[in-house]
Amino acid sequence: MHKSVDNLILIKKEIQFKNSIAEIIAVSKTFPINDILPLINYGHKHFGENKVQEAIEKWTTIKNQFKEIRLHLIGKLQTNKVKYILPLFDYIHSLDNIKLAEKISQEQEKKKFNPKIFIQVNIGSEVQKNGVDINDLNEFVNTCKANLNLNIIGLMCIPPVNKDPKIYFTKMLDLLNETKLKKLSMGMSSDYVDALNYSSSFIRVGSKIFGERS
């Protein structure tokens, strides 16, 4: 069996051990399709990409061949790229401002395709990071759902580096309950085990599956 499939199976076992039902997003950015095919052939469905252009080149044909694949955009999305991502991406994890929300709303109307969307929260209130401020979150969620007809399913975060992620995962769980949303996208290769303890619905794992990026 291919090494990436072995790695995926180990992570699935960890999820079962934690009595979690989290889905694994295999973050395939920078990896060629030949590295990804063993996972597809194994039956894995959820894959994550950061860059729109790379995703279009890699996934357009493959997604037509394998209809069950669900593609997640986990990187920063610029408004001028929105027209290219629907219906290629089934999930968007990085909605972080109202202009982007409006653009997605317009585009989904045109394409008659409603992606599932996570709002990115700036959970550590970091100046250099994207994300909606915690204090503005409730209003932002309501605007996206009521005014823009977006299919907001949950919240996403990237905790501050070199700090205990558990503090931030706890906060995210509180915010999820407060906003009455259903899903959490949190946990990457370095901290997904902790994220599983805080009801994460999707963990975004790259290097732990595919190996280190060159």
Image (cartoon, rainbow, N blue to C red):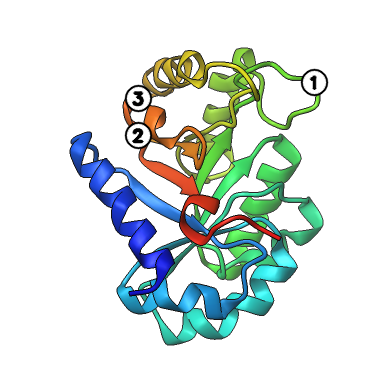
The residue lying toward the viewer, choosing from 52 and 132, is: 52
The residue carrying mark 1 is 127
Report if residue 181 is visible in the image: no
Give the mark, 1 or 3, whose residue is nearer the N terminus.
1
The residue lying toward the viewer, choosing from 155 and 6, is: 6
Mark 1 and mark 3 in contact? Answer it, CB < 8 Å. Answer: no
In the rendered image, residue 114, in percent from the top left (x then y), is placed at 49, 58
Residue positioned 77% across, 52% down in the render: 79
Instruction: Name the amino acid, label 2.
Output: Lys
Instruction: Name the amino acid, label 3.
Output: Tyr
Report if residue 131 is visible in the image: yes
In the rendered image, residue 194, in percent from the top left (x then y), is placed at 39, 27
Label 1 residue SS: loop
Q: Judge whether 87 appears above or below 80 on screen.
A: below
In the rendered image, residue 46, in percent from the top left (x then y), is placed at 42, 61
The residue lying toward the viewer, choosing from 25 and 154, is: 25
Horizontally, is 33 left or right of 107 in the view?
left
Horizontally, is 200 left or right of 81 in the view?
left
**Front of the two marks 1 and 2:** 1
Q: Quadrant of residue 141?
A: top right
Residue 198, label in figure = 3
Q: Judge whether 45 appears above or below 184 on screen.
A: below
Give the mark, 3 or 2, whose residue is nearer the N terminus.
2
The residue lying toward the viewer, choosing from 24 and 74, is: 24
Label 2 residue SS: loop
Label 3 residue SS: loop
Q: CA distance from mark 1 to mark 3?
A: 25 Å
The residue carrying mark 2 is 182
Horizontally, is 17 left or right of 76 in the view?
left
Q: CA distance from mark 3 to mark 2?
A: 13 Å
Quarter the N terminus occupies: bottom left
In the rendered image, residue 85, in percent from the top left (x then y), is placed at 64, 65
